[in-house]
Image: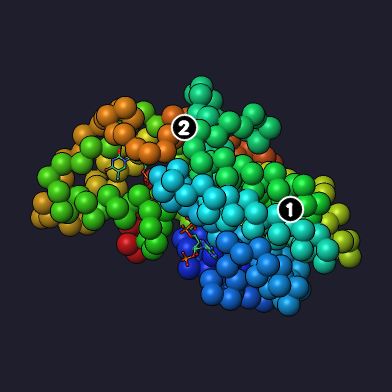
Amino acid sequence: MSGRILLTGVTGQVGGELAATLAAVGEVVAPARDEMDLANPASVREKVRAIRPRWIVNPAAYTAVDKAESEPDLAYAINAEAVRAIGEEARKIGAGVIHFSTDYVFDGTGNAPYRETDATGPVSVYGASKLAGERALVESGAGYMVFRTSWVYGAKGKNFLRTILKAAKERERLRIVADQHGAPTWSRDLARMTAQVIGRIEASGAGRELTEALGESGGIYHAAGAGETTWFGFAAEAIERLREREPGAKLAEVEAITTSEYPTPAKRPLNSRLSCARLAATFDWRMMDWRDSLREVMTEV
Ligand SMILES: NC(=O)C1=CN([C@@H]2O[C@H](COP(=O)(O)OP(=O)(O)OC[C@H]3O[C@@H](n4cnc5c(N)ncnc54)[C@H](OP(=O)(O)O)[C@@H]3O)[C@@H](O)[C@H]2O)C=CC1
Ligand SMILES: Cc1cn([C@H]2C[C@H](O)[C@@H](COP(=O)(O)OP(=O)(O)O[C@H]3O[C@@H](C)C(=O)[C@@H](O)[C@H]3O)O2)c(=O)[nH]c1=O
Ligand SMILES: [Mg+2]
């Protein structure tokens, strides 16, 4: 056990899974939103000071990509300023910070999987606010890790899979973009990975300060599902699994369209692929192939 872990966003997709996996590596304290509002940095600072955690794990975020275009102040408050407050308070008490970020920090040009060292260039307010959060954390001077992930889904919460499964039963036809490439990531896989990484850092610690251990093996890591597809490919595969499960059900046809045929307030990167080689090399963790995790999630959804 590694001491207290302050967990944010416990009602979210990743936070809900982290509450379960982190219980094996420490004492999880997960304040409700009315006790710690990330839009209010003072309440964040106060909570960190009261709890004095060894780790702060922060999957909370403003994740409404389209809405962020018209609410940039709130998106930046939660995705950047709260992260600054977390980082600064963590530094003061020597706590380690684990933060989550996104493929949307990239502009999505090219076809190669992005590495951690590649240049960022967000094309949306959400992406820019998440990048600002990464930078605020670095500037805070805390020992940290950032896990950049993509296309998070699971059996619970608000996600593309659940939207599609519901729509497949209600509608005749779904039109889904087939020119944005990336990989769906299972929220539970991310949470398992996070617990393993904390466990490894604690095990390698041997009396060292956490800040020192994170100075060596911390920083940014890409952590997305293995394999790749498009949103269309993801939807088609999910509907195929649904058809196997409910052979008689009447399900929508899925039509592949281009991004320009599906106008949205926020622009999305066409290339969301993330190379997870650093995570594998440093922590011996390989994220699940999205097709395998989809099969598991379909048994629970
Ligand atoms: N979802 C995705 O596809 C992807 C997500 N990410 C990143 O991964 C992380 C986890 O995402 P995910 O679990 O899907 O997010 P969710 O949208 O499922 O959950 C977000 C969480 O943040 C909480 N939250 C939002 N605003 C506040 C606030 N003002 N004060 C306190 N808590 C707040 C929410 O609480 P409440 O329930 O009360 O609203 C919720 O618990 C985030 O950092 C996200 O940017 C990265 C790539 C893809
Ligand atoms: C529902 C729907 C979506 N789409 C498109 C819109 C978009 O390009 C893509 C996915 O739709 P979503 O609204 O789920 O996508 P979005 O909210 O942009 O998902 C993103 O969320 C944030 C939090 C992240 O960090 C990203 O990694 C990514 O997961 O599919 C269709 O083409 N047809 C449809 O019927
Ligand atoms: Mg969305």
At x 51% / y 41%, what residue is drawn? 125
Q: Which mark is residue 269?
A: 2
* 55 shown above or below 78: below
Based on the displayed image, in which of its 4 quarters is residue 35 positioned? bottom right
> What amino acid does circle 1 point to?
Tyr
Q: Specify whether residue 117 is in view.
A: yes
Which of 133 and 185 lies nearest the eye of the viewer? 133
On the image, the x and y values in percent for residue 172 come to 12, 45
Q: Is mark 1 on a helix, strand or loop?
A: strand
Tell me: residue 31, above or below residue 72: below
111 sits left or right of 159 in the view = right
Q: Which residue is drawn at 77% across and 63% down?
A: 89
Classify the position of the N terminus by image quarter.
Answer: bottom right
Pinpoint residue 175: horizontal percent, then vertical percent: 23, 37
- Mark linked to residue 108: none
Label number found at residue 144: 1
